[in-house]
Amino acid sequence: MPRWKIAGINFDHFHMGDLLRRVHDHPNAEIVAIADEQPGRMAEAAANFGIPSNRVYSEIEPCLIETQPDLVILCPAAARHAEWTERVAPFGTHILMEKPFASTLAEADRMIAAMEKTGKQLAINWPLAWVPAHVKAHQLICEGLIGEVREVHFYDGNRGPLWHGADKIEHEPTAEEKDASWFYQKAEGGGSMLDYLGYGTTLGTWYHGGRKPIEVMSLWDEPTGLEVDEHSVTVARYDVGLSKFETRWGTFTDPWTHPPTPRCGFNIVGTEGTIANYDYAATVRVQTREHPEGIEIDAPPLTAPHANPVQYFLHCLESGSPIEGPLSLEISRIGQQISDTAYLSAQEKRTLPLLT
C-alpha cells in the first residue's frame, strides 16, 4: 500500500484545518507540506500537526516542486477555485477542493478541463456529505422506502462564517475581521448563497438521483452596509414538482451546538413517504404508508473507508473506484448549474431556465 503524500495549499477557508486533521489521523497518509501566501494563517496548523518549518511554504511552486505531493487539498476563496486548480494541476497531483465547486459554472468547467489534461482526479468536498443522517437518508431512498423523490426541502447555515474556526472552535468576530474577510466580499465569492446553496443543490441532486430542474427562481436579502447576502431562498421546478433550498447566515445557534429553529438539514418527500434528516442528528424520521405516525431510524456513525473525504478519496485512488455521490464532478456540476441559475435569478429578480 502506498503512503500518500498530501499538501494543504491556500488557507482562505478555515476548513483547511479540519481536512489536515483527517490527513494527520489517516494511517496511510502524511502531511508533507502546507503553503499559503500569508504565512500567519498557517501557524495554527503547523503547531497542531507538528509540521516542521522547512515544510511550511509561503511560495506555492517551490512547495509543489520540492515535496511532490500525490494529493493537494485546496481551500481558496470561492471565486478563486478555477485559478488555483489551474495553478496546481500542471504539477500532476490529484486535487481535493473544499466546497463550493466554484463561484460560477464557467469556472467549474475550467477546473474540469484543467484536470482532464493531467489524467489526475478532482473531487469536491461537501462536509454535509459526511453527516450520518444525510448518508442514511440517501440509503433509504435507494432502498425505495419512500418511493420516487418528488421534493427536497433544504434549510441550512450557521451564525456566520467568522463565528468559528478549524475544529469548530468558537470565535466571536470583530467588526474589523468582518470587513476584511473574503466571505463578505462579492468579488471573492462571498455571501450565504455561495457559501451554502451548493450544499443543498448538490446533495439535493444526489437525493433526486441526478435529475435536473427545468427552471429556477431565487431571492436574497440585501443587508444594509453589506455587499453580499446573509439569507437566500431558491425554488427549483422539476418535472416531478418543486424543491426549495434556503441559506442563512445568522441562525440563532450553530447547528453543531444546539439545533436552531428552523432546524438545519433536509426534508424529503417521496411518492410513498417522507424523510426528515437533520444536520448532526442521531436518527432520521421517516413516514410511510405503514407508519404514517412516523418512526425514528438510527443513523449510525460512518465507517471506513467512507467516513471522511480524505479517507474516501484515497480509497478511490487505491482501488481504482470512481468517485461517486456529492464529491463527484457529475453531481457537483448539476449542483453548480442550479446555484448559478439561482444567483443570476436573484440578481435579475426573475425566474430563469436552468443554465447549461
Image (spheres, grey):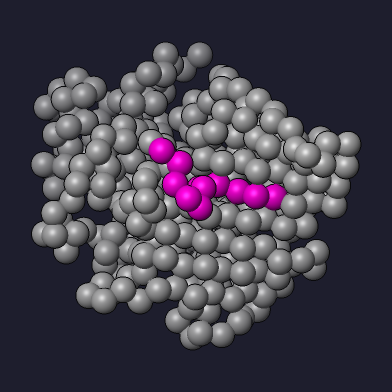
Residue 54, horizontal then vertical, whole percent: 13, 27
Q: Where 239 sits versus 65, above or below?
A: below
Q: Where 309 sits versus 25, above or below?
A: below
Q: Is residue 341 magenta?
A: no
Residue in the image at 27% along x and 64% along y: 184
Residue 120, horizontal then vertical, whole percent: 50, 41
Q: Where 57 sits versus 32, above or below?
A: below
Please give the range of residues in magenta: 258-268
Q: Main secondary structure of the magenta part?
A: loop
Q: Nearer the viewer, residue 33 or 164?
A: 164
- Residue 123 seen from this side: no
Q: Which image quadrant: the C terminus?
A: bottom right
In this rendering, would 38 be left or right of 108?
left
Residue in the image at 76% along x and 66% along y: 241
- The picture quadrant where one finds residue 217 is bottom right
Residue 171, horizontal then vertical, whole percent: 20, 42
Q: Is residue 261 magenta?
A: yes
Residue 322, horizontal then vertical, whole percent: 64, 37
Residue in the image at 13% along x and 60% along y: 175
Judged from this view, the residue extending furthest toward the right is 290
Residue in the image at 82% along x and 41% along y: 292
Q: Where 227 sits versus 326, above or below?
A: below
Tally of marks: 0
Q: Nearer the viewer, residue 335 or 72?
A: 335
- Residue 207 seen from this side: yes
In this rendering, would 140 be left or right of 223?
right
Judged from this view, the residue extending furthest toward the front is 293
